[in-house]
Each structure stands twice: as C-alpha cells, then as structure tokens.
Amino acid sequence: MTDQPDPQEQPGQRMVLVTGASGAGRSTAIHVLEDLGYEPIDNLPLSLVPRLLDGPPLSRPIALGIDVRNRDFSAGALIEAIDRMTREPGIELEVLYLDCEPGALVRRYNETRRRHPLSPDPGEGIAREIDLLAPIRARADIVIDTTELTVHELKAEVQRWFDQLGPARIGVSVQSFSYKRGVPRGLDIMFDCRFLRNPHWEPALRPLDGRDAAVADYVTDDPRFGDFFTKVLDLVELVLPAHLEEGKAHLTIGLGCTGGQHRSVTLTEKLAAALAQSGWQVSKRHRELERRASAGAGNR
C-alpha cells in the first residue's frame, strides 16, 4: 500500500503582493515577476481578492499588483486582505513594497507629466498617498527603495529576491521595532533588547538613533552586549541553513526595545551587517524611524 502525501506537507500557492507609492516602480516589478514565471494579476478590485483565494490553486506563483488606483481601494481593506491571506494555510504570501523619496517621485511625475491618482498637484498627491500607505508599508516583508535605482537596477533587485530558477537561497529581513507600538506582523524570530542600558536617558543621545556612532558605542559598551550579540548571531546562523533546507523563502527577525529608536536599531544594524558578511541575503528595516520619516514628509 502506497502512503498518501500529507496535505499539510504540500506546497501552498505562492503569492507576492506588490504595492507601494505610485511612480515607485510597481509596474516594473510586476513585469519582472512575470518574466520569472509568475502569473501577473494587476489592479484586481479588492472586493474580488476573496474570490481569487477561494478558487483552485494556479500552477504558477501569483504576482498580485495593488495600489491606490485599484477600484474600491482602502488601506483598511488591503490590510484585511493581507491578514486573511497570511492566515490561509494554502497561501504562502510575501508583501513587496516599492518605496521612494517624495522629492524623487515629484521629479518623476514632472518628467512624465502624468497625473497623480490622488491629486492634480503631484506633491500633494504623493504626500497623501505616503500617509495612506504607511500601515501597508509597516506590514511589508520586503521593502525596496527605488529612489536611487535605475530601471535596470530595480529589475535586478526584484530578480535577486524572487528568481525561483536561481540557486536555492533564503532572504533574511532584520527589523527593529518599539514594543509600545506592538510586535510587527509575520516575525519568525524575536529578541527583546530592553535589558540593555538605554541611551534615551542621556540628553545628548536622546534625539539621535541607533545608526549614530555615539549611540552605537553607548549600546555596545554595555557589558552584557557582547555575549548577547554573539549568542543571537550564533543562533540565527544555526537555524538559517535548516530553514533553507525546508524550502523557506524568507525569514524575518525582529529586535525590539521600548521606543524602537536606539537599542533595537543598533542591534538590527549590527546583526544585518554580520549576516551579510557571512554571505546571507539580508535587508533591514527600522519601523519606528520609517514612521517618523513618513510623518515628517507628510507635514512638509
């Protein structure tokens, strides 16, 4: 008698949801994914996403493009769709967010003379859109900043993350966050940095963040830092090959502290650098710093 395969062990429908600011390169990313063998579904009304999920699985992975131009778009509805797809056992979802600095977006709109979907004034439309998409960006698995990228560089970056025909690899995302604002969605591993001494209580360091050398020195001078960082790095490097062998495409590591500005940012910077030095494909994000930057752009 032949053993029947366990349905829970069957690979799910892989889906990449591509979104981001208008003009940041979403269409280019969709075309690259199509060339890589993904089934492109662009500008699907959000109300039809449940029907897509309820249908039979496709023979190819899906590249689902959604932005503010979609009919019935709202940030809440997209977040609900992301959360539903994350809960679906038969869906392997990754959210790709194409980001870009507001000034670069304005230049692109002025060069193409296209109308922004939210306003005849590109600057106003871009500010509104960045504010609208902030919670979506916070839920992204992969963020690609296209501000300084040419079209060819963007294509290469998307291919680097999603080429299924290339050698087996796993993408690692290292993220800092504030526990006060909640744990980010989709973390695979999480470390609490709040036991390290806090630069917030040093007036000269308080306005800086963990990327600043003075803050990094303050954090790493804590006698507990060295052993903690070494053990975290050893653990991550221990489990990464095992996740790769299991066919996992992406691993997300979260490092949290009280405000998400100092300790967790320093740890994220150093862990991402160490993993990249070891040859792993790594991206890093600082959720609270991104929120502050987005709020500042919206106020200009």
Image (cartoon, rainbow, N blue to C red):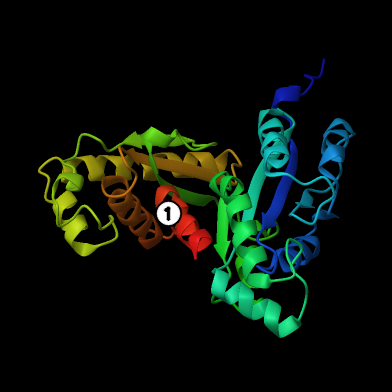
Along the line of sight, the residue nearer the viewer: 195 or 248: 195
For image coordinates 68% across by 68% down, the residue present is 25
Left or right: 82, with 179 as reference point = right
Q: Amino acid at mark 1?
A: Arg
For image coordinates 71% across by 49% down, the residue present is 17
Name the spot of residue 61 as percent of width and height, x first: 78, 48
Left or right: 167, with 181 as reference point = right
- Name the image quarter holding residue 79: top right
- Name the image quarter holding residue 234: top left
- Asked whether residue 281 is in view, the answer is no
Q: Residue placed farthest to the bottom in the image?
A: 111
Q: Is residue 8 above or below residue 286?
A: above
| Quadrant showing the N terminus | top right
For image coordinates 73% across by 61% down, the residue present is 118
- Asked whether residue 79 is in view, the answer is yes
For image coordinates 78% across by 66% down, the residue present is 31
Residue carrying label 1: 292
Name the spot of residue 8 as percent of width and height, x first: 71, 24
